[in-house]
Amino acid sequence: MCPGGGGPAGADTLGAVTAALVRSLSRLARTAAHPAAPACPACGSADETLADRPDGTVVRHGDAVAKAHAPGTEAGPHAVRLAVAGHPALAGVLLAPLPERATGPAGRPLSAWPYGRPVDPADPEAAPWEQAAVLLARMHRVDPGVLPGPLPPMRGPLKLAAALARMEREAGGHPAAAEVRRAWRGLPGTVRGAGGRAPVPAALCHGDLHLGQLVRHPAPDGPWVLIDVDDLGLGDPAWDLARPAAWFAAGLLAPDVWLRFLGAYTDAGGPAVPDPADPWRTLDAPARALTVQTAALALARAAAAGREPDEVERAVLDACTRIGTLAPELERGAPS
């Protein structure tokens, strides 16, 4: 909640904070775009805000972007994650940061990155599912011992808990919230962050895979690489496959796309699926967890917008309601 509450004064304060943050990002992006030159072709136009969310704001200037990381980002793990992104072992897998850094309003860390062309949401047929799978497999196979450390834990389970907390704050009274809670209580402790051993040795994980986390670099036609290391760390690599697995189970990802993604991952030697003939032995619990997380966020976002869940959100909520019978459906290899 912004200072001053939801009235005009609070809105004015929030607007001032956002404007100050964007100005800080513009300065950093301009410095990163031409550190040894006074100007570039983009200097004649306004900088472009590519994203503006509570957990991250991104501003582009020419060939560089600057990102404000989430409030409360811990300095130590954040520095390690940036160092990992620039490590030679991840070359061609993760986009490497630029050297420029800054601190924004309220102490938020700001980082600079090369601009990469994102996935085109208007062309779903060209979505790079196989490329994403190969990049994940390469990441998961990197020896954590060669990387800067100490490596923080992958933040996937923490994001699940945060999604449930947000749902309770913003949509706890919605009738569907009870189903989400019930599905949450049925999850294994390993994916709820309640302890227990991972089913496979810990690997370097992205922590928040979706198609928005891929860009072509150099833009516009370079190879695909992964971006956004805010959730990166050691953990169960099956978590990085959980979102597409959950979408498949909910009927939101076509079976042929899912099979291409999974096949590309296993063909590249990805360790999250030790037995390609029975992938759900390791994917079932993380897929259930991502279904619960997505359903909780769907309710919260709908409540924040003052509307009921849309068709896609409803499909995820329905999958969450079916969570108790999800495993047999997944084992059959087809969404219900």
Image (cartoon, rainbow, N blue to C red):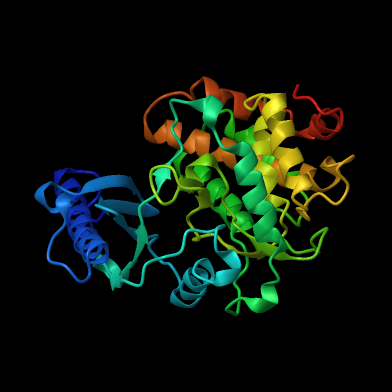
Q: Tell me where residue 288 appears, x and y as whole percent.
A: 72, 40
Identity of the residue drawn at 75% across and 24% down: 335
Quick check: 232 left or right of 265? left
Q: Residue furthest left?
A: 44
Q: Residue furthest front?
A: 221
Residue 151 against residue 43 in the figure, above or below: below
Identity of the residue drawn at 12% across and 46% down: 45
Camera-side residue of 125 and 67: 125
Quick check: 118 left or right of 57? right
Quick check: 278 left or right of 242? right
Q: Tell me where residue 280 appears, x and y as whole percent.
A: 83, 41
Q: Tell me where residue 268 appears, x and y as whole percent.
A: 74, 50
Q: Indicate the quadrant where residue 65 lies.
A: bottom left
Can residue 157 be spotted in the picture?
Answer: yes
Can residue 321 be spotted in the picture?
Answer: no
Camera-side residue of 82 and 266: 266
Q: Indicate the quadrant where residue 237 lies.
A: bottom right
Count of picture labels: 0
Quarter in which the C terminus is drawn: top right
Identity of the residue drawn at 67% across and 29% down: 257
Q: Tell me where residue 57 appears, x and y as whole percent.
A: 32, 53
Identity of the residue drawn at 17% across and 50% down: 42
